Amino acid sequence: MPAETHQFIEDLDVDKVLDLLVILVGVDAEPSDDPGGIDLGPLGLDDDGAVLHLWDAVAEEYGERSVGELDLDDEPPATLGELAELFHLALRGDREPGPPQDGGAAPRQQR
C-alpha cells in the first residue's frame, strides 16, 4: 500500500476540487446553486498568496504533495470554478485542459 503522500485519486475531477474549495473558503451554497460562478474578489482570494494557501490545502487533501508549486504566471482565475479547474489541471500534472466540462475551455491547438 503506498503511503498517503504518494496516493493519487484516479477519479478526481473538477467538481470534486470545487466541492473542497467551497468547504475551505466557507461558501454557503445550496445544492441547486452554482458555486463555480462565485467571484474570488469578495472572498478575499484575489491575490497570489491566498490562492497558494488554498493550493497547499487542496494538494494535501488529495495526497499529491509531489506536484510542487502552482504556476500562477498565466491570467489569474476570476471565479471559484476557474480556480478549481486550475487546481485540477495542476493535480493531473499538466497544463492542458481535458474535454470541456460545463462550459470549460476547449483544448488548445498544438503548434
Image: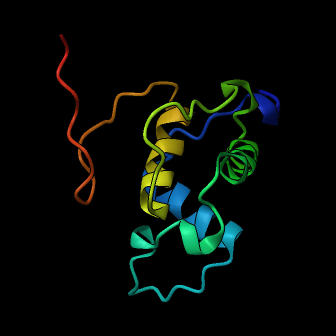
Quarter of the rendering containing residue 28: bottom right
Indicate left or right for 47 with 109 as reference: right
Q: Residue at x 76, y 44 (%)?
A: 60
Q: Position of residue 97 (x, y in %)?
A: 33, 35
Colour mode? Answer: rainbow
Q: Is residue 84 above or below residue 27?
A: above
Q: Residue at x 59, y 70 (%)?
A: 22
Q: Looking at this view, is 45 or 30 the one in front?
A: 45
Q: Position of residue 1 (x, y in %)?
A: 78, 28
Residue 20 in sight? yes
Q: Looking at this view, is 81 or 12 the one in front?
A: 81
Q: Position of residue 37 (x, y in %)?
A: 39, 71
Quarter containing the C terminus: top left
Q: Is residue 97 above or below residue 16?
A: above
Q: Is residue 104 above or below residue 28?
A: above
Q: Residue at x 64, y 52 (%)?
A: 47
Residue 1 in sight? no
Quarter of the rendering containing residue 62: top right
Q: Position of residue 49 (x, y in %)?
A: 73, 47
**Image label count:** 0
Q: Residue at x 59, y 41 (%)?
A: 9
Indicate left or right for 35 with 22 as reference: left
